[in-house]
Image (tube, rainbow, N blue to C red):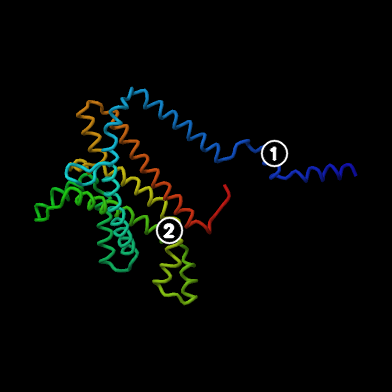
Amino acid sequence: MTALNSHTAKAAVTPETETHRFSPLLSFRTRLYLTWAVLFGLCVMFFMSFDLKFSIIAQKLPNLIGLHLGPDGFLQGAALTLFLCFCSIWLSLLLGFVTALARLSRSAVAFGIASFYASFFRGTPLLIQILLIYLGLPQLGVVPGAISAGIIALSLNYGAYLSEIFRAGIMAVAPGQREAAMALGLRPAATFLHVVLPQAMRTIIPPTTSQFISMLKDSSLISVMGVWEVMFLAQSYGRSSYRYIEMLTTAAVIYWLLSIGLELIQNRLERHYGKGFKHQR
């Protein structure tokens, strides 16, 4: 009888109760926030070691953020950077989607054009593409503005990368999903829009957002054409005041905050399209 009671007591101790007994006092989210706070504090200490002059930062910050218009009456600073990225994001999404469909089609011409486009713009540096469009098109009789050339270059470059992301996401959907939709009598277009694409979005969103964050930073390359975006202003103010570190540090913080905004959008989209794939951490 004693042996039976002992066996029963041991059986009552399950892995769940053991995990609960030795679980940490702080939750995962709390430990996450503490980790971020420590790393952020170390980062602040690193930049404070540069003996920054905050009076210069406060003086130039409104222009770097884009609260004031530029000398030409147009946007400048972070506002112009967001405008460039906003236009380029939508154009690159369109180009990437069309190119991905062409890569998946059975047309040799469509596949050839799409594969050549993706190969060229993924295989050459973005800076060269910007200069080719800005300096090369005038020789053909087309004279784009610096902002227009930057938007075209960013859209073409990132559209090539997004096409591979879209193609991989569409191909990752199990063929059985299409077969089940056909068995229900759905047309190919309806199958793609209502069955394949929603499932592909779960795979597409994370790398696509990463590309948009890269686009946000690569927009600084447009400063070579004299566009008054964040990097151009930071370099100009640093040159005029001989305080490069203050301006570059401010530009880095602005880019980081903009990237965090995109990350928050990514998390929201992932939660929306991942409702059917929820799992416990």
Q: Where is residue 244 in the image (x, y as percent from the top left)?
A: 26, 28
Residue at 24% over, 51% down? 151
Amino acid type shown at disc 2: Met
Q: In this view, does 5 lie to the left or right of 256?
A: right
The spot of residue 171 in percent (x, y) is 41, 61
Residue at the outermost bottom position: 185
Among numbered discs 1 and 2, the one appearing first in the sequence: 1
Q: State the residue in front, 158 or 232.
A: 232
The local secondary structure at tag 1 comes to helix
Task: Classify mark 2: residues with Cα within 10 Å, few (<14), some (14-19) or many (20+).
Answer: many
Q: What element carries label 2?
A: helix
Residue at which label 2 appears: 201
Quadrant of residue 140 within the rendered picture: bottom left
| Residue visible at 49% across and 53% down in the picture | 271
The residue that label 1 is drawn on is 21
- Quadrant location of the N terminus in the rendered image: top right
Q: Where is residue 117 in the image (x, y as percent from the top left)?
A: 25, 57
Q: Is residue 57 left or right of residue 236?
A: right
Closest to the observer, 16 or 73? 73
Q: What residue type is labelled 1?
A: Arg
Q: Residue at x 40, y 29 (%)?
A: 44
Residue in the foreground of this view, choosing between 143 and 135: 143
Q: In this view, does 119 lie above or below 193?
A: above
The number of numbered badges drawn on the structure is: 2
**Position above or below: 218 against 107:** above
Q: Distance between the residues labelled 1 and 2?
A: 39 Å
Q: What residue lies at 25% left-to-right and 54% top-to-bottom?
A: 156
